[in-house]
């Protein structure tokens, strides 16, 4: 399967998915660590892709949504953004609402 199709299926197949460096249990960069902690603090399970373990995804994800950096959070198939946006949404309470609405169905 083409890498772009794999990315699309991962995003469309999960209500909340975080493309990050490392895993939520063992993040490999500070941005991924903060982002995964913020998403986890919203209280719902979420999918993740370790882009360090998937070099094809790491090399091509920026083409999918025209976003150059990691982590990248998608909710209901839409790009939310990277670490700064995730943290801003978490701090103002919006991220929790977004995650809860996405995972309620």
Image (cartoon, rainbow, N blue to C red):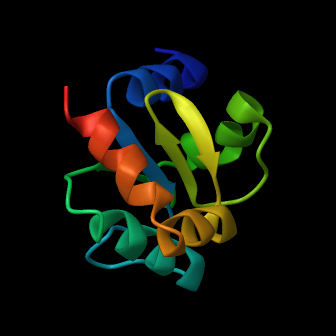
Q: Quadrant of residue 70?
A: bottom right
Q: Determine whether, in the image, residue 25 is placed left or right of residue 75.
A: left
Q: Residue 14: where, in percent of width, then height?
A: 32, 31
Q: Quadrant of residue 57?
A: top right
Q: Is residue 37 above or below residue 81?
A: below
- Number of marks present in the image shown: 0
- Residue at left offset 66%, top offset 62%: 85
Q: Quadrant of residue 96?
A: bottom left
Q: Residue 88: where, in percent of width, then height?
A: 61, 70
Q: Is residue 10 above or below residue 35?
A: above
- Residue at left offset 55%, top offset 25%: 3
Judge by depth and name the residue closer to the eye, 33 or 59. Answer: 33
Q: Determine whether, in the image, residue 15 is placed left or right of residue 89.
A: left
Q: Which quadrant of the figure contains the C terminus?
A: top left
Q: Residue 101: where, in percent of width, then height?
A: 32, 37
Q: Determine whether, in the image, residue 16 is placed left or right of residue 75.
A: left
- Residue at left offset 73%, top offset 58%: 69
Q: Is residue 2 above or below residue 17?
A: above
């Amino acid at each position: 399967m083409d890498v772009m199709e794999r990315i699309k299926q991962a995003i469309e197949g999960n209500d909340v998915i975080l493309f990050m460096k490392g895993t939520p249990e063992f993040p490999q960069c500070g941005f991924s660590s903060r982002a995964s902690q913020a998403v986890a603090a919203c209280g719902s399970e979420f999918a993740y892709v370790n882009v360090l373990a998937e070099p094809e995804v790491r090399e091509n994800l920026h083409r999918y949504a025209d976003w150059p950096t990691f982590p990248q959070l998608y909710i209901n198939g839409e790009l939310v953004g990277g670490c700064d946006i995730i943290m801003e949404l978490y701090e103002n309470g919006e991220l929790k609402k977004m995650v809860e609405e996405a995972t309620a169905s």
